[in-house]
Amino acid sequence: MTNGAAGRIEITDLGMVFGRDGRTVEAVRRFTLMTTPGEFVALLGPSGCGKTTVLNAVAGFVPPTVGRVVVDGESVAQPGADRGMVFQQHSLFPWKTVLGNVEFGLKMRGVGKKERKSQAHAYLNLVGLTGFEHAYPGELSGGMQQRVGIARALVNRPRVLLMDEPFGALDAQTRLTMQELLLGVWREVRTTVLFVTHDIDEALFLADRVAVMTGRPGQIRDLVEVKLARPRAAEIITSPAFMALKARVLAQVREESARTLSRPRP
Amino acid sequence: MATAPKVGIAPFVGATAAQVATQALLRLEGWRRPALRVLSIGFFFAAWHVATTWDMDFYVRFQNIPTPAEVLEEAVVLFGSAGFYVHILASLERIWLGFAIATTLGVGLGLLIGWFRFAEDTLFPPIELFRPIPAVAWVPLSIMLWPTERSSIVFITTLGAFFPIVLNTIHGVEGIDRQLVRAATSLGAGRLAIFREVVIPGALPSIVTGLSVGMGVSWICLISAEMISGQFGVGYFTWVAYGIVKYSQIVVGMLVIGVLGMLSSALIRLVGARCMPWLPRRMKDGT
Ligand SMILES: Nc1ncnc2c1ncn2[C@@H]1O[C@H](COP(=O)(O)OP(=O)(O)OP(=O)(O)O)[C@@H](O)[C@H]1O
Ligand SMILES: [Mg+2]
């Protein structure tokens, strides 16, 4: 289930401006970020700072206003199966079973039915959902739905996995379980992960590097290396090393939140 | 030693009694709703019986209205003769044809109009213009347009079903979650695949609602058209019965229309539920 050494994201001087009814909103300004293949990078920032916008640009959903997004030497022009996306919630096809959802990418590539099924089974097993193949998404809990979403994106063996607050809608207990599960899965597939969150603990627990963003227009304010040994267990968040990192990030995030709040909305 | 079995038996007996009672209750629970439904129809017939046998007259006059017994008698005679079936089959054929054409056109156009801006700009304006005209108002023009009585009535029936179907389909397509489309594209789906895998199933619940409403409207249009212009059909039969003073036949005709309409709506619901196994039961039943 490994895939080469690919997965280098290069975001250079990205600027994203939205226009609506004659007003313009500058969501992202001069955003630059490089990842190495197989790296886990978290994007952390206050609400509305442009995290989703950056992810959408990498996914190819929205073209950059200025700047460039390059993945493995190719300029991103449109969405593609090489960049898998896991959304916050409600992105599974409600009319497809769990198996149908996970198979979808393979079906689009014209993989035969039998082969599709066996590959989908492997990824369902990876996220611990064996036995739920024939359930519909509406019958699953939020955590299970997100696991299907992860399996569905991974079955394409993407070079990059984009995750937009995938655990944001889950309760604290489930979120912790999902974080550990994600790390386990990532150890198997070793794809580059760009993970958006506004939860500091989550970012530090998961990532190799945490990119702290400023308030809107979003820029990178700090890049924090998280040199905590892997595999990481949940207890790590009480270690002194973790606490020190957290204190550093927290101070920045609070500053940015305060700045965002004190500034009048356009 | 002697008390042990007593203690043992007492709860055992209690348990079985409770179990029997629960099971009886459960059986009753299962029968409650069907029983209520039968009862409510029974109540209606009883009221009808009372009003007609007592020849009630309180502004609404029941003197000329046949009693349930008379209607039943007439129904037995009618269903024993071949002539009545000709009328029923004529109506069923027209409904089936009209509804099939309306479904094909309505769903097809609705999907296009809902998904493609160009189709919306070119196809939607005439639909908006013709929609407020009741299908029955088309009857005179329809008789001139179409060569046979059959085709003219099928046209009216089609027209009636078409508008609810096309509008609900458009509505269903427009309500599709953008995020699902994005998810599909990021999984490698092309334009055609998105249409097939996201747009059509996403609009399906709304399409089925449209078919359900369309079926009701097409019956209304069929019967009206038959009453105005037909020579066959249950609508024609009912109208003629009034002319030749066969009041029991009027009511038989009406009840046949009611039962056929009810059955065809049930058929749509059944097919809809089959096509959408992902929807929770409650929504499928429409309750
Ligand atoms: N399509 C759009 N049109 C206009 N404005 C937009 C559009 N998309 C995003 N924006 C604006 O850009 C800014 C950044 O939005 P974005 O969704 O990227 O923030 P975010 O960091 O993901 O926030 P959150 O944490 O709340 O998800 C917001 O002010 C938003 O209103
Ligand atoms: Mg967001």
Image: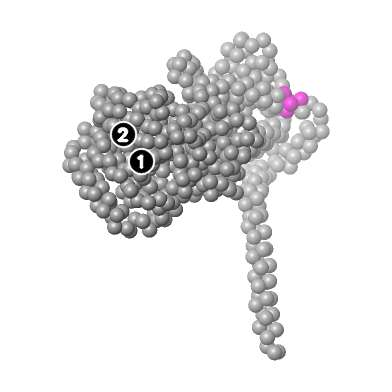
Q: Is residue A125 magenta?
A: no
Quarter of the image where the C terminus of chain B is located? top right
Quarter of the image where the N terminus of chain B is located? bottom right
Left or right of residue B20, residue A141 in this image: left
Residue type at numbered disc 2? Leu
B33 up-or-down from A80: above or below: below
Residue A41: numbered disc: 1
Q: Secondary structure at mark 2?
A: strand
Q: Is residue B89 magenta?
A: yes
Q: Quadrant of residue A112?
A: top right
Q: Which residue is mark 2?
A: A33
Residue B74 rendering spot, x and y as whole percentages? 76, 35
Residue B277 rendering spot, x and y as whole percentages? 60, 40
Colour scheme used in the picture? one colour
Residue type at numbered disc 1? Val
Badge 1: few (under 14), some or many (20 or more) residues near its Cα, within 10 Å? Answer: many
As measured in the structure, the alpha-carbon distance from the residue carrying label 2 to the one carrying label 1 is: 10 Å
Q: CB under 8 Å between callouts 2 and 1?
A: yes
Q: Chain of mark 1?
A: A
B153 up-or-down from B54: above or below: above
Instruction: Read off the magenta span.
Output: B86-90
Left or right of residue A15, residue B84 in this image: right
Give B161 or B91, whichever is nearer the viewer.
B161
The quarter of the image that holds ligand 2 is top left
A46 up-or-down from B128: above or below: below
Q: Secondary structure at mark 1?
A: strand
At horizontal 82% and vertical 33% (from top left) the residue drawn is B80
- Dot 2 or dot 1, earlier in sequence: 2
Q: Looking at the picture, do discs 2 and 1 lie on one chain?
A: yes
At horizontal 75% and vertical 39% (from top left) the residue drawn is B72
Give B266 or B74, whichever is nearer the viewer.
B266
